[in-house]
Image (spheres, rainbow, N blue to C red):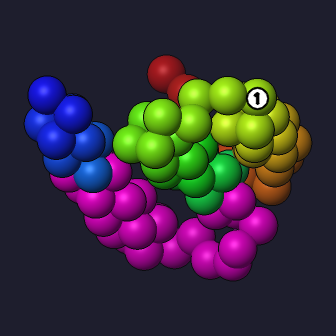
Amino acid sequence: MKILVSSFLLLSLTASITFLVHKRKKTGVKGWKTALTSICFYAIALINLAAYWWDGLGILSWMITLSLLMLGAYFTRYMALTSEPSS
């Protein structure tokens, strides 16, 4: 069961990162600051996967997850704004 869950998560992460990179290239968004929120959230998934595999769901993984979540929330200020067409 552990292998199935992990492989599904890694497959989903790979597909999501590929989609994000393609979408950023399509819209012409450049720079690291606009990608920092996504990077933090992907890092959360990888940290929790590592904690799941090594039975390390303790205070350290929680603190890293919480720190990355706050950093991701902070870096949303640098995300590109999309203009929606008004009707």
Going by the image, does 1 lie left or right of 59?
Answer: left
Q: Is residue 33 magenta?
A: yes
Q: Nearer the viewer, residue 18 or 27?
A: 18
**Residue 65 on image: x %, y %:** 70, 36
Q: Nearer the viewer, residue 10 or 79?
A: 10
Residue pushed farthest top?
A: 87
**Chief SS of the magenta region:** helix
Q: Which residues are magenta?
A: 11-36
**Residue 62 on image: x %, y %:** 72, 30
Using the image, determine if residue 12 lies above or below residue 62. Answer: below
Q: Residue at x 52, y 40 (%)?
A: 51
Going by the image, does 6 lie left or right of 28?
Answer: left
Q: Nearer the viewer, residue 27 or 12?
A: 12
Find disc 1 in the rendering and name its residue: 59
Quick one: quadrant of the N terminus?
A: top left
Residue pushed farthest front?
A: 55
Q: What amino acid type is highlighted by mark number 1?
A: Ile
Q: Is residue 18 visible?
A: yes
Q: Nearer the viewer, residue 87 or 26?
A: 26
Q: Residue at x 27, y 51 (%)?
A: 10
**Residue 56 on image: x %, y %:** 57, 36
Number of other residues with Cα within 10 Å of mark 1, as a class: few under 14, some 14 to 19, many 20 or more:
few
- Residue 86: quadrant of the picture: top right
Q: Is residue 51 magenta?
A: no
**Residue 58 on image: x %, y %:** 67, 28
Q: Residue at x 76, y 67 (%)?
A: 33
